Image (spheres, coloured by chain):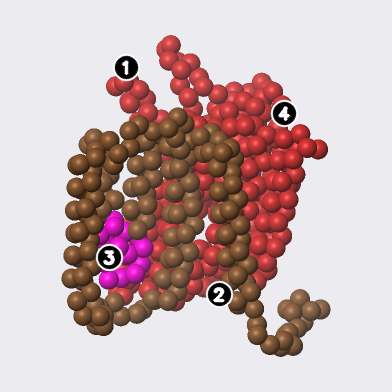
Amino acid sequence: MIGFVILAIIALGGGIGVIVARQPVHSALFLIMNILALAIFYILLSAEFLAAAQVIVYAGAIMVLFLFVVTLLTAGKDDREPKENLAGQRLTAGILAVLVGGGLAVVGVLYPSRAIGLGLPHNFGNLRGMGVTLWGPDFIYLAAVALMLLTAAVGVLVLNRPRRQVKPAPRLEERES
Amino acid sequence: MIVLQVVLLIIKIVLLIAILMGGFAYTMLLERRLLGFFQLRLGPNRVGPGGLLQPVADGLKMVLKEDLMPAGADPFVYRLAPVIALFTALCVDAVIPFGAPIHVFGLTVNLDIANPSIGLLIAFAFSSLGVYGLVLGGWASQNKYSLLGGIRASAQIISYELAMGLSVMGVLMMTGTANLEGIVLYQKHHGWLFFPQIIAFIIYFITAVAETNRTPFDLPEAESELVAGYHTEYSGMRFASYYIAEYINMITVSGIAVTLFFGGWLGPWLPPIIWFFIKVAIFLFIFIWIRATLPRFRYDRLMNFGWKVLLPAALIYFLGTAAFVSGLI
């Protein structure tokens, strides 16, 4: 329980920090802090594979790409508070957030057994459990997601191909020889 | 009993860090002397017999150097970055088994800090965090050379991490476990995995050189273009942290290669831990040999090689291993 509270504070602090920090690199660091806290949550649920995957995929790959772009674009930029273009968006967002949070709390109190999961499935989130889930009954979803991601990747390549056929510049290898 | 286990754990952690620090110091000395011999000179041999006390002198010099920070730097991130680099480098070694479990005073002591069932994935998770030290250090220095070094580091390490992950998949499929001790014990009965997985090993080793930013993949700190890359602005112990992290990463990837492909601590006659250190030392020598022999990659070739050669090759070998393990061929 103590561990849960400490981790929850770290995770929430990370989440709030992402929004509050003015420097994009600091926001990215707070997001990494949040991701790592979630990974330790998975370990507390003895879902060790999910924890390792969380760190390798999100912290180790996606956030590095984020940082790559952020460091490339924001080096030496002014990091003061930007002028707000949409008046009152903070107020609206705040009211909506409070409403959603309050709604969730009410549902959680009224239907405790449904809102809070009762126990975890066998082998939850470890290597064997994940393998059985992904390659057993849920294989069709895995294939569907894989197909969708492949389509997205091919789509990016198609959208970014040069419009007109320009005569290609001689390749570096050829120029050398 | 629990108190005893905690004390044992702390002793093991302190010992591991001490071994790694000592390993770093003498790998560096070995590298400087060997590079000297490769270039027909002697290398540092003045401090102590045969230069053996050179690391002490270097350490003293690093501690006494002034710790500088550029005026425009981001103070918190600037101080955090070398810590991340060193911390992640040390953490990976916690799951590597250095030898067979030993029995002292009726206790069974595993020669690793932790032995999780997914040890290999934990090692990869920590090593994938190491790149933050480089990127953040380069960014926080507010220096264009540092920034270029940091950006190069992130692009290079992300590109080569994919091929590295695929290259060890074959080992996982053949042994059926991600536990590093289990992988070593499998090789006790079936022989070194190097023989069935030779292509995977070659890909692993190339990507390991790239992940540790060693020549010929040292583009993030290419001194002829970027002064010193991401650690240009660092001095004193912060600079030393980066340096230590690089050498400890070298020891770590060698240790993982030995564990996965060369039977870990297994070997006749000598005690297991000695075998482990001998195998790692051979790898370290190869690292130094490569540095003395090969010139640096050009950037476009680095990217082409990673994405168009290593990744497809690793993928094909991975699929071939899968077909073999499942009995298709």
Residue at which label 1 appears: B1
Residue at which label 4 appears: B191
Magenta portion: prevailing SS class: helix
Measure the alpha-carbon separation of dots 1 and 4.
38 Å
Measure the alpha-carbon separation of dots 1 and 2.
57 Å
Evaluate whether label 3 is on the same chain as label 2.
no
Residue at which label 2 appears: B225
The amino acid type, in three-letter code, at marker 1 is: Met
Outermost top residue: B106
Q: Is residue A111 above or below residue B211?
A: above
Task: Give the residue displayed 78% in from the left and 37% down from the top.
Answer: B328
Task: Give the residue displayed 40% in from the left and 48% down from the top.
Answer: B87
Image position, residue A127 (x, y; %): 52, 36
Q: Secondary structure at mark 4?
A: loop
Image chain in red: B
Neighbourhood count class around disc 2 (C-alpha, 10 Å): few under 14, some 14–19, many 20 upward: few
Residue B165 shows up from this direction: no
Q: Earlier in the sequence, mark 2 or mark 4?
A: 4
